[in-house]
């Protein structure tokens, strides 16, 4: 972000963008840094939460011959705008209306499971059985691997 700061503009923030410098303060944790970057993209850039997360932590698109060409074009375009985030391996996010999660593609052994119960609770973890869920409440079980997004 620091390397691209001089080229940044925002129709939403205009000259107030300068008040956000430094965009990512020195000495912050990975979590704080990605939170700052996400806030900049969503509030300052006007991107949706899902769009911003796909920019920050893209799927492993370059070597995937099965990827939809439109999705590949999305990632290729955004790769020219910014480098992928090199922070936490797994991130869950929400804006109060939408929830999602992503796993960095550089962690091929990483994976996550999630369960959505019939009373709309979401449980996500790296392994099954983290929380006991009565079988009658189990509505949907899904898994996703590194480089994938769940929304």
Image (cartoon, rainbow, N blue to C red):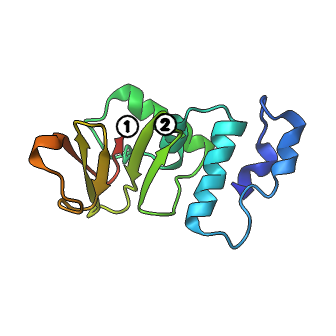
Q: Nearer the viewer, residue 73 or 106?
A: 106
Horizontal side, residue 138 vs residue 24: left or right: left
Horizontal side, residue 93 vs residue 4: left or right: left
Query: Which class describes the residues within 10 Å of circle 1: few (<14), some (14-19), or many (20+)?
Result: few
On the rendered image, what quadrant is the N terminus found in? bottom right
Horizontal side, residue 98 vs residue 125: left or right: right
Q: Nearer the viewer, residue 111 or 134?
A: 134
Q: Residue at x 29, y 51 (%)?
A: 123
Q: Position of residue 73 (x, y in %)?
A: 45, 31
Instruction: Give the mark, 1 or 2, whose residue is nearer the N terminus.
Output: 2
Q: Position of residue 140 (x, y in %)?
A: 18, 38
**Residue that extends furthest to the bottom in the rendered view of this protein:** 27
SS under mark 2: helix
Q: Residue at x 79, y 37 (%)?
A: 9
The answer to whether residue 60 is above or below residue 33 is above
Circles 1 and 2: CB distance less than 8 Å?
Answer: yes
Can you tell which mark lies on residue 151?
1
Q: Residue at x 11, y 42 (%)?
A: 136
Query: Which class describes the residues within 10 Å of circle 2: few (<14), some (14-19), or many (20+)?
Result: many
Q: Nearer the viewer, residue 40 or 63?
A: 40
Q: Position of residue 8 (x, y in %)?
A: 77, 42
- Which residue bears the numbered disc 2? 50
SS under mark 1: loop
Q: Nearer the viewer, residue 21 or 119?
A: 119
Task: Quote the CA–CA distance across marks 1 and 2.
Answer: 8 Å
Q: How many marks?
A: 2
Q: Residue at x 79, y 58 (%)?
A: 22
Q: Position of residue 84 (x, y in %)?
A: 52, 52
Can you tell which mark lies on residue 112?
none
**Residue that extends furthest to the left in the rendered view of this protein:** 135
On the rendered image, what quadrant is the C terminus found in? top left
């Amino acid at each position: 972000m620091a390397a691209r700061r001089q080229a940044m503009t925002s129709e939403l923030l205009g000259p107030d963008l300068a008040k956000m410098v430094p965009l990512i303060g020195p000495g912050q944790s990975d979590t704080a840094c990605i939170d700052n970057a996400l806030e900049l993209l969503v509030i300052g850039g006007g991107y949706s939460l899902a769009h911003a997360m796909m920019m920050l932590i893209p799927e492993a698109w370059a070597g995937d011959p099965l990827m939809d060409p439109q999705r590949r074009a999305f990632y290729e375009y955004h790769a020219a705008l910014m480098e992928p985030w090199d922070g936490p391996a797994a991130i869950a996010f929400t804006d109060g209306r939408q929830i999602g999660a992503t796993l960095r593609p550089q962690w091929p052994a990483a994976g996550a499971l999630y369960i959505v119960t019939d009373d709309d609770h979401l449980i996500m973890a790296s392994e099954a059985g983290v929380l006991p869920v009565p079988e009658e409440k189990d509505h949907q079980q899904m898994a996703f691997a590194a480089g994938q997004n769940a929304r």
